[in-house]
Amino acid sequence: MILVLPGQATASDHGGILPYRDPAALREGARIYADYCASCHGVQLEGQENWRDRDAEGYLPAPPHDASGHTWHHPDDQLVAITKYGIEALVGNGYQSRMIGFGDVLSDQEILATLAYIKSTWPAQIIARHDEVNAMAADD
């Protein structure tokens, strides 16, 4: 039996799939983030400088994954797809990005753990807003 108190929402209530309250997943996600993501997105999830402006080669620098970025603007399934396949595969139409897909390197569980770690670092109000994004995506 699962008890959900009135006013308490779970990630699954909002269509979310990230295990951001699971300590084991967060430990795994932190390790994977450090190994595969921090070199571009920053040790503190701060991203690269001028991440909204294309560089001389026409690429956007890596965005932050902290609350100042736009990661939380996207539903979980889209974040998983970006991480798994790369942004170019999702956007198409010749869009160029240095963000590769990690589907050949990381398992689905590892991708979920990494994204859960990122989400776990956000302030409560950003987590709540991300849950709303997931709820809207689930309603579509």
Image: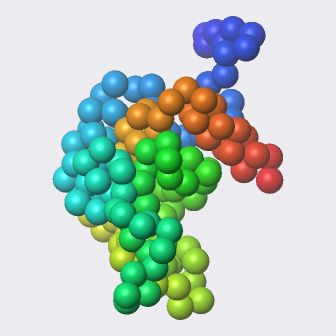
Q: How is the image coloured?
A: rainbow
Q: Is residue 72 above or below residue 86?
A: above
Which residue, as the protein is rendered here, is positioned at the far right?
Answer: 140
Quadrant of the image for the N terminus?
A: top right
Position of 50 relative to 58 (above/below): above
Residue at left offset 48%, top offset 64%? 82
Q: Position of residue 129 (x, y in %)?
A: 65, 37
Please provide percent x and percent y for residue 84: 42, 63
Residue found at x 69% / y 8%: 5
Asked where in the image residue 56 lies, by quadrant, the reply is bottom left
Q: For the point 44% across and 87% down, which residue is it?
A: 58
Viewer can see residue 108? no
Query: In the rendered view, does 11 fall on the left or right side of 109?
Result: right
Where residue 86 appears, as percent x and y from the top left, is 43, 71
Residue 116 against residue 34 in the figure, above or below: above
Q: Is residue 41 left or right of residue 137?
A: left
Say if residue 47 shows up in the picture: yes
Give the total number of marks visible in the rendering: 0
Residue at position x 34%, y 34% from top?
25
Left or right: where 45 falls relative to 27: right
x, y percentage for residue 88? Answer: 48, 79
Nearest to the observer: residue 48 or residue 92: 48
